[in-house]
Image (cartoon, rainbow, N blue to C red):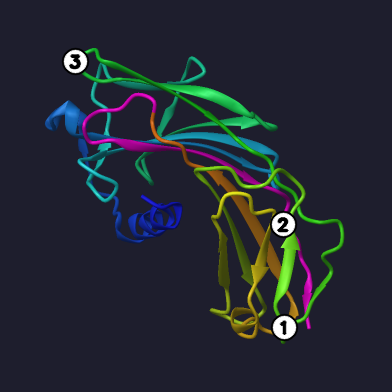
């Protein structure tokens, strides 16, 4: 599956998922889809280790683990966040890598390591012309297999946010197309950028799953002219 397709599925999952959940003991353990994410947000200087469990696939019913099943990150048990039905641990600062370990109710253990690849904005990003394409050459390594960079631009007008995607191996920058920039309102705005590394799981049930290492540098606030 292409990374762009994976990203699209992620968006659909967020839009379609609800607060409904079931205990993991109510389903076949081999049909549990596991979703792991290690996310660093430089705006808060926090790293989040998150694990979500669903029945069958990415769009399946969310599950709350039944005793004695548990999920850990680097040996620490993750806390269940009831409102969003996922497991999480917050950590101060940048945690570059780590290992998730999930044990199901049958005692089977699945171990998956993940790393975060960094990215930064160019030093000068103060003004962006809306009547022409604009290229951001990021600071950081070029894209490797299983990586994507997304840039979200949000202007002053309601509903004018635009999303841009780079997913080709070897890319070192991303082009903000004129056709989308023209839709952004004139004036001060915000840009946030995410670099996501999405390799295949190392250990999984037959339902499969994902692991994501994501890095978000401090947001930029250019003027859209």
Nearer the N terminus, badge 1 or badge 3? 3
Task: Using the image as rendered, state which of residue 154 and residue 6 is in the foreground.
Answer: 6
* Quarter location, residue 26: top left
Mark 2 and mark 1: span between their CA atoms?
A: 22 Å
Q: Quadrant of the C terminus?
A: bottom right
* Quarter location, residue 187: bottom right
Nearer the N terminus, badge 2 or badge 3? 3
- The residue under label 2 is 219
Question: Quick check: is 213 in the magenta stretch?
Answer: yes
Say which residue appears at 28% left-offset and 35% top-offset.
Answer: 208
* Quarter location, residue 171: bottom right
Q: Is residue 123 above or below residue 99?
A: below
On the image, the x and y values in percent for residue 123 come to: 86, 56
Mark 2 and mark 3: span between their CA atoms?
A: 44 Å
Q: What residue span does the magenta drawing correspond to?
A: 202-225
Q: In this view, does 166 lie above or below 145?
A: below
Specify whether 51 is left or right of 57. right
Task: Using the image as rendered, state which of residue 18 and residue 166 is in the foreground.
Answer: 166
Nearer the N terminus, badge 2 or badge 1? 1
Label 2 vs label 1, nearer the camera: 1
Task: Using the image as rendered, state which of residue 219 and residue 213 is in the foreground.
Answer: 213
- The residue under label 1 is 132
């Amino acid at each position: 599956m292409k990374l762009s397709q994976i990203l699209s599925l992620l968006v659909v999952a967020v839009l379609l998922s609800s607060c409904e959940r079931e205990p993991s003991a109510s389903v076949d353990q081999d049909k549990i889809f596991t979703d792991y994410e290690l996310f660093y947000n430089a705006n808060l200087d926090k790293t989040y280790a998150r694990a979500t469990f669903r029945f069958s696939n990415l769009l399946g019913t969310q599950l709350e683990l039944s005793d004695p099943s548990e999920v850990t990150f680097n040996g620490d048990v993750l806390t269940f966040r009831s409102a969003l039905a996922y497991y999480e641990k917050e950590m101060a600062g940048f945690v570059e890598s780590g290992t998730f370990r999930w044990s199901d109710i049958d005692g089977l253990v699945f171990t998956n390591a993940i790393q975060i690849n960094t990215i930064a904005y160019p030093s000068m990003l103060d003004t962006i012309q809306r009547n022409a394409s604009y290229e951001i050459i990021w600071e950081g390594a070029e894209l490797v297999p299983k990586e994507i960079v997304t840039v979200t631009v949000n202007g002053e007008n309601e509903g004018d946010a635009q999303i841009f995607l780079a997913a080709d191996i070897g890319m070192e920058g991303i082009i903000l197309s004129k056709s989308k920039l023209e839709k952004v309102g004139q004036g001060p705005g915000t840009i946030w950028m995410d670099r996501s590394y999405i390799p295949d799981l190392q250990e999984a049930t037959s339902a499969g799953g994902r692991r994501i290492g994501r890095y978000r540098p401090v947001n930029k606030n250019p003027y859209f002219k």
